[in-house]
């Protein structure tokens, strides 16, 4: 298999490195060329001139770009390079409807499309331990499996195109609730004057223990929120979840509350911080002034 990668950001650069470690990475392309050149210098892969050239060199092209319009733009740009056996594996988080639209664009050029959003953060991307929620034809998924196995530990076929993204929406609502709970509880603990590293240690090994507490809690109690997962990107994901809930005539409290809190943080210029920056708003509740 010759695999290519588009979107060498916080997630994508590590995912591409894991394709390289598995001996699969043939070429990369990134909108900002420096990142592609750096990865090529590190791994020895080629830098494609544009997305179409990348598609023409590779059987499987993995994407991890920011948002819906970006996925549609990149899939359209690859079009003339697709061959009969091309597979696009989109690991970005976008709407299920966008996945279906991108799949139609790819199918119009003879390529298969899998929506394969991921969970596990930048740590999971670096370690190759992502959870991958796959939507699309089983036959294409089987063919793409070596690339997916290089990047993830748990790969689950959810159903047709779009079901991977719908599953990711479930995940993102849960992440919002966990962020609310952890950031609020830690701000409360600080206000009690507790030794917070020890709180994280003991609470993290009991029934309330979770990945976010162990991995983001220590930064939160130091007032440090490096990404990680950018707050602006999670807000984008929650807007997708909000729209999907609205289609069922429902407003979900965790989504509504988290988007309200995020909107204040975005206004104050914290969109490029990790989502754990929600802790700023919780800490502010306890400030005496
Ligand atoms: P990021 O660091 O901001 O990287 C985004 C990448 O997409 C960059 O390489 C960027 O290129 C590229 N890009 C954006 N728009 C593009 C366009 N129109 N055409 C071509 N390339 C474009 O974001 P990230 O954190 O890696 O996240 C990427 C995706 O994974 C998002 O959908 C996010 O929701 C999802 N995700 C993120 C995490 C996480 O923990 N970070 C976890 C799971 C899923 P430039 O270099 O030119 O800017």
Image (cartoon, rainbow, N blue to C red):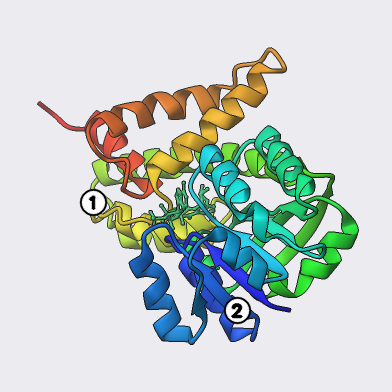
Which quarter of the rendered picture does the C terminus lie within? top left
Q: Closer to the N terminus: mark 2 or mark 1?
A: 2
Q: Residue at x 70, y 58 (%)?
A: 88
In this view of the protein, which residue sits in the foreground, 72 or 173? 72
- State the residue position of label 1: 223
* Residue 231 in view of the camera: yes
Q: Residue at x 65, y 36 (%)?
A: 98
Q: Residue at x 31, y 47 (%)?
A: 272
- Residue 43 image point, x, y percent: 48, 85
In this view of the protein, which residue sits in the foreground, 92 or 269? 92
Which quarter of the rendered picture does the N terminus lie within? bottom right
Q: Which mark is residue 96?
A: none
In this view of the protein, which residue sits in the foreground, 226 or 211? 226
Q: Residue at x 58, y 66 (%)?
A: 53
Residue 206 falls left or right of residue 250? left
Residue 258 image-quadrant placement:
top left
Q: Residues within 10 Å of mark 1 (few under 14, many from 20)?
A: some
User: Is 108 above or below relative to 247?
Assistant: below
- Residue 55 image point, x, y percent: 64, 64
In this view of the protein, which residue sits in the foreground, 122 or 65? 65
- State the residue position of label 2: 25
């Amino acid at each position: 298999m010759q695999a290519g990668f588009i979107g060498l950001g916080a997630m994508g650069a590590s995912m591409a490195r894991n394709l390289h470690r598995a001996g699969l990475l043939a070429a990369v392309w990134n909108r900002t060329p420096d990142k592609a050149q750096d990865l090529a210098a590190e791994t020895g892969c080629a830098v494609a001139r544009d997305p179409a050239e990348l598609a023409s060199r590779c059987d499987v092209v993995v994407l991890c770009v920011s948002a819906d319009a970006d996925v549609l733009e990149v899939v359209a740009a690859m079009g003339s390079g697709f061959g009969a056996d091309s597979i696009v594996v989109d690991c970005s988080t976008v709407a299920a409807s966008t996945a279906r639209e991108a799949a139609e664009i790819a199918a119009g050029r003879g390529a298969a499309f899998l929506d394969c959003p991921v969970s596990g953060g930048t740590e999971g991307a670096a370690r190759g331990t992502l959870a991958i929620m796959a939507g699309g034809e089983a036959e294409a998924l089987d063919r793409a499996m070596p690339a997916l196995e290089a990047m993830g530990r748990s790969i689950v076929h959810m159903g047709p195109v779009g079901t991977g993204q719908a599953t990711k929406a479930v995940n993102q609502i849960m992440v919002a609730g966990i962020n609310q709970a952890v950031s609020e509880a830690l701000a409360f603990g600080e206000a009690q004057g507790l030794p917070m590293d020890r709180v994280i240690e003991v609470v993290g090994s009991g029934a309330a223990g979770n990945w976010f507490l162990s991995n983001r809690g220590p930064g939160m109690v130091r007032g440090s929120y490096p990404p990680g997962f950018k707050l602006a990107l999670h807000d984008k994901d929650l807007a997708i979840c909000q729209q999907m809930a609205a289609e069922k005539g429902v407003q979900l409290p965790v989504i509504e509350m988290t988007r309200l809190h995020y909107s204040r943080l975005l206004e104050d210029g914290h969109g490029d911080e990790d989502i754990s920056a929600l802790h700023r708003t919780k800490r502010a509740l306890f400030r005496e002034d």
